[in-house]
């Protein structure tokens, strides 16, 4: 969870989720709950993030890095839910 101290305000955040959650379809589907919870927690901790929270989706090239094609598709769908 990010922490800000002092007179600082963030105008937004960008999140890149690595391939760790693509090991199985179940872990990718669990991300559908974990990701929105993380965004809500960050926005509670840093109210200025209500303006913008972007994320980068995993690319299909991850399969050559040990990711599983079906799980990567599930992960991408989870990010949009």
Image (cartoon, rainbow, N blue to C red):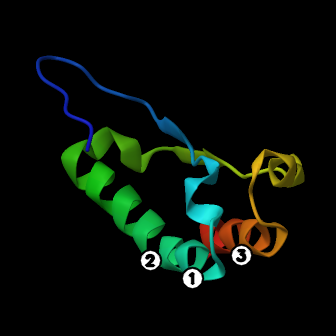
Residue 69 % position (x, y)? 83, 67
Q: Residue at x 48, y 37 (%)?
A: 13
Spatial CA distance of label 2 from label 3 is: 13 Å
- Mark with earlier residue (1, 3): 1
Query: Looking at the rendering, which quadrant does residue 4 occupy?
Result: top left
Task: Kindly give the residue lying farthest to the left in the view shown.
Answer: 6
Q: Residue at x 86, y 48 (%)?
A: 64
Q: Residue at x 72, y 52 (%)?
A: 57
Report whether 32 appears left or right of 36: right
Residue 70 % position (x, y)? 80, 75
Q: Which residue is mark 2?
A: 33
Report whether 33 appears left or right of 9: right
Q: Contact, CB < 8 Å: mark 1 with mark 2?
A: no
Question: In the rendered image of this protein, does residue 72 appear above or below residue 13?
Answer: below
Q: Quadrant of the N terminus?
A: top left
Task: Choose between 5 and 1: the one closer to the eye.
Answer: 1
Q: Nearer the viewer, mark 2 or mark 3?
A: 3
Task: Choose between 52 and 5: the one closer to the eye.
Answer: 5
Mark 2: few/some/many CA within 10 Å (<14, 14-19, 20+)? few
Spatial CA distance of label 1 from label 2 is: 12 Å
Name the element at disc 2.
helix
Q: Contact, CB < 8 Å: mark 2 with mark 3?
A: no
Q: Which residue is mark 3?
A: 74
Q: Which residue is mark 1?
A: 26
Q: Residue at x 80, y 49 (%)?
A: 62
Q: Quadrant of the C terminus?
A: bottom right
Spatial CA distance of label 1 from label 3 is: 9 Å
Mark 3: few/some/many CA within 10 Å (<14, 14-19, 20+)? many
């Amino acid at each position: 969870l990010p922490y800000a101290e002092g007179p600082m305000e963030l105008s937004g955040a960008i999140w890149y989720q690595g391939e760790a959650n693509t090991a199985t379809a179940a872990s990718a589907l669990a991300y559908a709950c974990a990701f929105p919870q993380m965004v809500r927690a960050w926005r509670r901790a840093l109210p200025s993030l209500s303006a913008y929270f972007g994320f980068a989706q995993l690319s299909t090239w991850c399969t050559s890095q040990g990711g599983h094609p079906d799980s990567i598709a599930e992960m991408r769908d989870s990010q949009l839910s």
